[in-house]
Amino acid sequence: MASETDHVESVRALRQLRRMRTFYAGGAVLWATSAASAGWDDPGGRPMWVSVAILAVFAVLLGMTVLWLRRRQADRAEEPAHHAAPRRTAWRRHASA
């Protein structure tokens, strides 16, 4: 059974991966727009190819992040869900005589 710190670190890692996925998706959109604009102005020019290269980097990073997220979520699906704090055992009260 995993300790509480392992669970907290796992939740933090998933949260960070989701943030990075959003960042990489934004970067990919930005550089796709830049590559399209540079390609429109000067097809085959150096600025277009630089934008395409940076777009490729962001696309690879986005793909790796999505892959890691799917693997982490698949691993977590096998674990039992703990939605609430563990219950305390109730004290047994004996009837007074």
Image: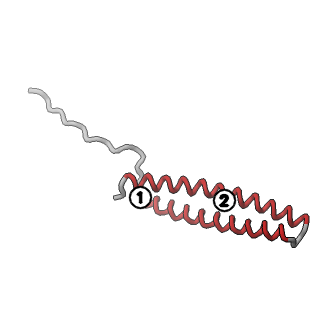
Would you call the spot at circle 2 few (<14 residues within 10 Å), some (14-19), or many (20 or more)? many
Q: CA distance from mark 2 to mark 1?
A: 29 Å
Q: Which mark is residue 79?
A: 1
Direction from residue 83 to residue 38 in the image, left or right = right
Please identify the quadrant where the C terminus is shown. top left
Q: Amino acid at mark 2?
A: Tyr
Measuring from the top left, give residue 56's x and y in whole percent.
71, 69
Question: Which of the 4 image quadrants contains residue 18?
Answer: bottom right
Q: Tell which residue pokes out farthest to the front in this image.
A: 46
Residue at position x 42%, y 52% in the image: 81
Give the mark nearest the N terminus, 2 or 1. Answer: 2
Residue at position x 87%, y 73% in the image: 44
Secondary-structure class at tag 2: helix
Measuring from the top left, give residue 2's x and y in whole percent.
36, 58
Question: Which of the 4 image quadrants contains residue 23?
Answer: bottom right
Q: Nearer the viewer, mark 2 or mark 1?
A: 2
Direction from residue 70 to residue 54 in the image, left or right = right
Q: Which residue is mark 2?
A: 24
Q: Is residue 36 above or below residue 94?
A: below
Of 57 and 2, the residue lying toward us:
57
Measuring from the top left, give residue 64's x and y in whole percent.
60, 67
Please identify the quadrant where the N terminus is shown. bottom left
Secondary-structure class at tag 1: loop
Of 56 and 71, the residue lying toward us:
56
Measuring from the top left, give residue 36's x and y in whole percent.
84, 63
